[in-house]
Image (cartoon, rainbow, N blue to C red):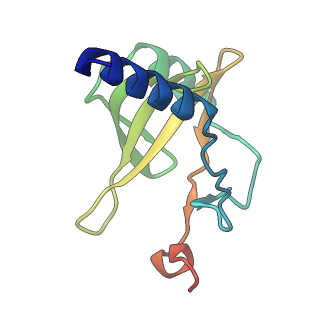
Amino acid sequence: MNDATRFLVISLAMYLGGCAYEPKQVEASRPLVNPSSTTQLQAMPANLQQALDTQPQGAALSTNSTTFTLGQRYVSALGRECVELLFDSSQSHSQRRAACKLDDQWYLVPQLEQASISNLLAEQ
């Protein structure tokens, strides 16, 4: 047998062996994120519904002593039109939230609750 034939036979054997191998199935023992404690969607105030449709990025809106700035618009993984909201707080940082449109009405999307790093470490 010449070298080309040996190479072809070894390549074919490796190819068939690779196709027959099934990788180990892995399941997570802990979730990376926990769903928010509330599943109710909070509708944005009626006076902001049209503004959320028409105002450009960077526009400032106020309601009930809360001021926020419109951020980027995007389409969520569920196919909903959404906009990032930057809430101004009395401290030096802003809180980021999102509002998404469902059935021609804007709703404030609940934030995900993140698991702590210590809960994500694998048990030995």
* The C terminus - image quarter: bottom right
Q: Position of residue 98 (x, y in %)?
A: 49, 39
Query: Compared with residue 111, is residue 75 higher up or lower down, i.e. above or below?
Result: above
Q: What is the quadrant of residue 22 in the picture?
A: top right
Q: Among all residues in the image, which is located at the extreme bottom?
A: 124
- Along the line of sight, the residue nearer the viewer: 34 or 15: 15
Residue 116 vertical position relative to residue 3 in the rendered view, above or below: below
Count the marks: how many?
Answer: 0
Using the image as rendered, state which of residue 56 and residue 84 is in the foreground.
84
* Residue drawn at the location 44% of the way across and 29% of the way down: 83
Displayed quadrant of residue 3: top left
Q: Position of residue 2 (x, y in %)?
A: 26, 18
The residue positioned 25% from the left and 30% from the top of the image is: 58
Q: Is residue 96 visible?
A: yes
Question: Is residue 44 something one can see in this rendering?
Answer: no
- From the viewer's perspective, is 59 left or right of 42? left
Whether 73 is drawn above or below 114: the answer is above
Q: Nearer the viewer, residue 99 or 7?
A: 7
Query: Which residue occupies 71% across, 41% down?
Result: 41
Left or right of 9: which side holds 19? right
Q: Nearer the viewer, residue 78 or 102?
A: 78
Position of 102 compared to 8: left or right?
A: right
Location of the N terminus by quadrant is: top left
- The image quadrant of residue 101 is top right
Q: Residue 105 placed where, x, y %? A: 66, 22
Image coordinates for residue 100, horizontal then vertical, percent: 57, 29
Vertical position of residue 25 compared to residue 15: above or below: below
- For this orientation, the residue located farthest to the front is 1
